[in-house]
Image: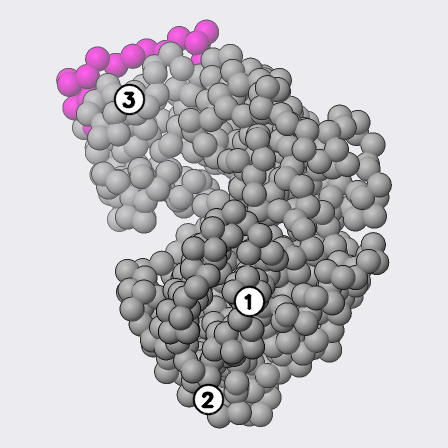
Amino acid sequence: MRSFSISKLFSFVVVMLQLVTLGSIVSVVTVSAEERPAAQGVVIDFDTEIMPLLTRHGCNAGSCHGAAIGRGGFKLSLLGSDAANDYDSITRSLEGRRVNRFQPERSLLLLKPSEQIGHEGGLVLEQNSAAFQKLFAWIEQRARRQRVRELVALTTIPESIVLDRPGDSVSFSVVATWREHNRNETSSNVSDWTVLTPNDAEAVTIDRPTSRMIVHRPGVHVVIARFMDRVLPIRLTVPMPTGSQTTVEPNALAETSTEPLDSERINPIDQFINTQLRELRIPSSPLADDHAFLRRVTLDLCGRLPTLTEIETFVTDTRPDRRAIRTDELLETRAFADYWALKWANILRIDAGQLQSEGAQAYHRWLADRIDHDEPFNQVARQLILSEGDSYEIGPANFSRFGNRPGDLAEHVSRSLMGVRLQCANCHNHPLDHWTQDDYHGFSAIFAKLTRGRIVSIAKRGEVTHPVTGQPAIPRIPGQRFLTADEDGREVLADWLTRERTPYLARVTVNRLWRELMGRGLVEPVDDLRATNPATHPELLEWLAQDFADHEFRFKHTIGKICHSQAYQRQCEPVLGNETDETFYSRKLARPLEAEVIADAIGDVTGIPLELDAPMTTRVVNLTNNLAESRTLDLLGRCDRTADCTGVNGASESLAQALYWINGPLLQDRVSAVDGKLFQLLRHSNDDGWVLDQLFLLTLTRPDASDSPFWKAELERDSDLDTETRRAFFEDVFWGILASQAFAANH
């Protein structure tokens, strides 16, 4: 007891010395009762009033006291994610000097942000501000932490609105719904304590005194509202100026009626896309012609160019639904399965360096077979999570060999199968989402007993240490619940993730499929789905995800649905009014081809395939070993699966690649090869116009090139060339096509 009394006496002396010192160097502001909340009236709740206040004024931001090591000796949790620790830091650390319960006006928590004494962060709180008064009143109430109420819902008014023109503004409010200790629910306006962050600070400004948002440019803009642990997007739409609208495709955009058009009734994708285009007054480009469509869909589905026979068959087909028929035919080919297995090998990062060539091959071929058979993807995901055994024989067992620690695998599962970047919750609660450190380390603990050698199995022991408690983390399904000791974490995870009503798997998968076919995801990055990163077309994303689940999570259904849409079939060339649109799908986005597809395409059109360091493999897209030596593929920019490459769409554009195109053997040797395609065409016919047309059909699926004025003039000028000069002329033409951006892109 004596030591306790001495300790209390020492603390009292420290406090008194603090008061005397502060009184001698600052002019203390006395706050009248009329200027502040009643100290003895309504209890001020630390968790739901003081914490949001600190967040609203940036005190716990990453650039201030919310940094990993704090700032100025004062550490707060990032964006107020840990109220208990923050309360201790404010009221108890530094010998309790930050709050003065006897004389609140002398509290460092007030003096520093109001810059009555030196503050590295400058002036944060005006002394007459509501925030200053609330802090003062809380300290006057003895700076207690009393759990008065619980946040149960947050709403914004408006959630979404269409304004008339740039410069217009809209008033806003943020309303919190609380559950009081008596279980009654109440609501209050918390706009003043909500952080509002526009996705483009130059497009939207927030006028706090009038509670209005001003939009300065056309388009769809998002303001993120953050209050406590809730984040909500506010969607602001301003149409393009009326004068920029050009009616180009009457059946798609000219009408202003909200009734769906015939094409939209057939394919809801077009209803979602066209509704937004009409709302924004963005005209759409017309549909691509049959030649362009065939090249596009063949590259997208099979990773190859259409053959001359396929071109002839398709463009002479008079059936009105020939595009849908051809799409469905391509979906049933083995080439589709092989090419999309390559895409998913990149997504799942099937790396022969980590898995050895035998493991990578088993994994890759298993994936291709699943895609070929159109196996429900939720069942594929289940096998990935649960498979064990010899990974050289059991392909999906290699999924669990990812990385070197349980956290690596947990992050891989969350990104690839959930569309969640859970790694942001490793060192602190996720700053932009609702994931906590308990979620991260509990999720990692699910995989702690897995062995990651050639034989994947469950060990008797294995744990992950929680950095906050220093104790073994309790296995946890993120955002859901902790698991009991007798539950198999992977079984529970597989059951939860793959059931229809769990949205994560369906949502991230359709977003990936959309990106592969449309050039960008409805959410970008594709593996970062969260409220603070909203979709460009949220209703479309939800519809696609539900439709995917309703059709048993089958790739071919959703891919076919997208390819059948007008949005997919539009031409890439802009029209007046949509030249700058790369977000709303008023035209098709041209995309560079993957390295493997370019290499195969060059081999196909020249007749000289790329030599591969892989027995029994004739096409590059079929390679199962990503480390197979190939300077060509390296320079073309193949995916390095040691790192994520989902944001890299197609071949690289390095100087080395450019020089390789110009001077390297990839093009030069194949264009001039005596056993190549060009020599065959030249020997077959003396009609230079026919040869030119064949080259353009082979490479660009573009008909009647010889009818263009430019090529007519070129062919007429060079009509009397001798054999060698004729060959050299066509070699230059062929090389020019192959070296063009038009050849190396899907458009």
The structure residue drawn at horizontal position 49% and vertical position 60%, both measured from the top left corner, is 743
Query: In the rendered structure, which disc, 2 or 1, sits on the residue that comes first in sequence?
Result: 2
Q: Nearer the viewer, mark 2 or mark 1?
A: 1
Mark 2 lies on a secondary structure that is: loop
Residue at the disc numbered 3: 123
In-image side of 76 versus 512 (left or right): left
The structure residue drawn at horizontal position 64% and vertical position 27%, both measured from the top left corner, is 246
Mark 1 lies on a secondary structure that is: loop
Residue at the disc numbered 2: 614
Query: In the rendered structure, which disc, 3 or 2, sits on the residue that comes first in sequence?
Result: 3
135 above or below 366? above
Q: Position of residue 654 (x, y in %)?
A: 31, 60
| 3D distance between C-alphas at marks 3 and 1 | 81 Å
Residue type at mark 3: give it: Leu
Q: Position of residue 655 (x, y in %)?
A: 28, 60
Q: Which quadrant holds residue 539?
A: top right
Taking depth in this image into account, of 610 and 513 the one nearest to the observer is: 610
Residue type at mark 1: give it: Asp
| 3D distance between C-alphas at marks 2 and 1 | 40 Å
Taking depth in this image into account, of 116 and 399 the one nearest to the observer is: 399
Residue at the disc numbered 1: 687
In-image side of 161 versus 318 (left or right): left
Residues drawn in magenta: 18-42
